[in-house]
Amino acid sequence: MGFHIVKRDNCPLWQKCCLYIGAVLLAVVIGGIVLLSIGVNPIKYYTRMFTMGMIGNRIAHVTFMNYLKKLVPLVITSIALSLAFKMRFWNIGGEGQFIMGAIASGFVALKWGNVLPMWLSLIIMCVAAMLAAGLYGLIAAWFKVRFSTNETLMTLMLNYIALHFLMFLSERKEDWNFFLDETSARPKFASFSQFVKMPTIKIGAKFELNICVIIAVLVGVLVFLYLKYTKQGYEISVIGDSVGTASYAGMNVKRIILRTVFLSAALIGLAAACRVGTAGILSTSITEDVGWTGIIVAWLAKLNTGIIFLASALICVLQQGSEVAASSFSQVSSSFANMLQGLILFLVLAADFFTRFRIARAKKGEKNNG
């Protein structure tokens, strides 16, 4: 008598929710055991981390505003990546596309930020970032449809090209390089915050809501409607299920791939414009790894646009909260969040497996074909 894996006929919604919530709680428990092993009280640490140190903090509103600055690019990038993933085009190039969008956005701000009205500069920054990132993503898509190249490797390599191009701009103090501050003796990026900056909406006496938060919500709503109620969204889902079926139905698969990847990368460019417009300066760490983290978020959310907001919020709490907690618990590195994030992803994927399969005991005399 043995055990074998059997496909589930149906997994109730309540059971799926229990499995996913249980996976997250198990990751937190394992993290707590690690904290105990190094002499840290896990309850105190988690309280500090999950509240991001805002309890009893007079400048809690500043902490929350900084949290939103991290959240917006991650949400938009994750939604953008899910578009390509739904079509089974594995866009691993979010970092590179983000960088190219950031450079294009910075170009507009530094060239015309002190000439054009701020509102017009911001619009052109967003459009330029979307075009630059979209076209950069289109490179891998074109090679995919033309030569059947592996998009995973292609987009991955394009990340490093973009990164080294940004580093090149940060180091070359030449007359042509207007990206750098002319008044600085050493090479450093010039600030344009005095000319161009994303506007905020004042709420109450202290809190200021960055307009990028509204942009992120609009992107989420529009992508949801696009996927659910448009012909183009239906074509994406058909190609994701079967390229052969899409071709048989008369769909122009190559054109759909090019269009969708361009849109996916362009939205990542919009995320970059939000980040650059808020920061008011370029930097070699401008992405803060959202291109990589966005992949994790998209898979944690199972490519569901609504759940992406929840998953992004959780990941950003882990990232920002761990930085705050690290200042109170010197023996815990701020990278503890990365470990916890990896644990959550691994266990959620395991939970997802058990929503589709179950382990059954083989009956006596039954052959195990698995």
Image: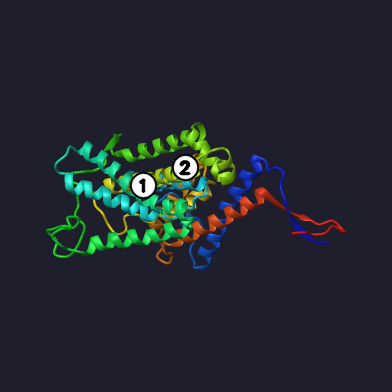
Q: Position of residue 350 (x, y in %)?
A: 61, 55
Nearer-N-terminus badge (1/2): 1
Going by the numbered disc 1, the residue's amino acid type is Gly
Image check: 165 left or right of 302? left
In the picture of the structure, the residue carrying the numbered disc 1 is: 134
Q: Quadrant of the N terminus?
A: bottom right
Question: In this rendering, is residue 11 above or below 345?
Answer: above
Q: Nearer the viewer, residue 26 or 163?
A: 163
Question: In this rendering, is residue 29 above or below 250?
Answer: below
Q: Nearer the viewer, mark 1 or mark 2?
A: 2
Going by the numbered disc 2, the residue's amino acid type is Ile
Instruction: Determine whether the residue tagged by mark 2 lies in a helix, strand or loop.
Output: helix
Q: Position of residue 146 (x, y in %)?
A: 45, 52
Question: In this rendering, is residue 94 above or below 184?
Answer: above
Badge 2: few (under 14), some or many (20 or more) residues near its Cα, within 10 Å? some
Which residue occupies 20% across, 52% down?
Answer: 191
Looking at the image, which residue sits at the far top?
A: 229
Examine the rendering and report whether any part of residue 189 can be seen.
yes
Q: Quadrant of residue 127?
A: top left
Q: Nearer the viewer, residue 284 or 25?
A: 284
Instruction: Determine whether the residue tagged by mark 1 lies in a helix, strand or loop.
Output: helix
Image check: 322 left or right of 104? right
Q: Position of residue 158 (x, y in %)?
A: 38, 59
Examine the rendering and report whether any part of residue 58 can be seen.
no
In the picture of the structure, the residue carrying the numbered disc 2 is: 256
Which residue occupies 87% across, 59% down?
Answer: 365
Q: Quadrant of the C terminus?
A: bottom right
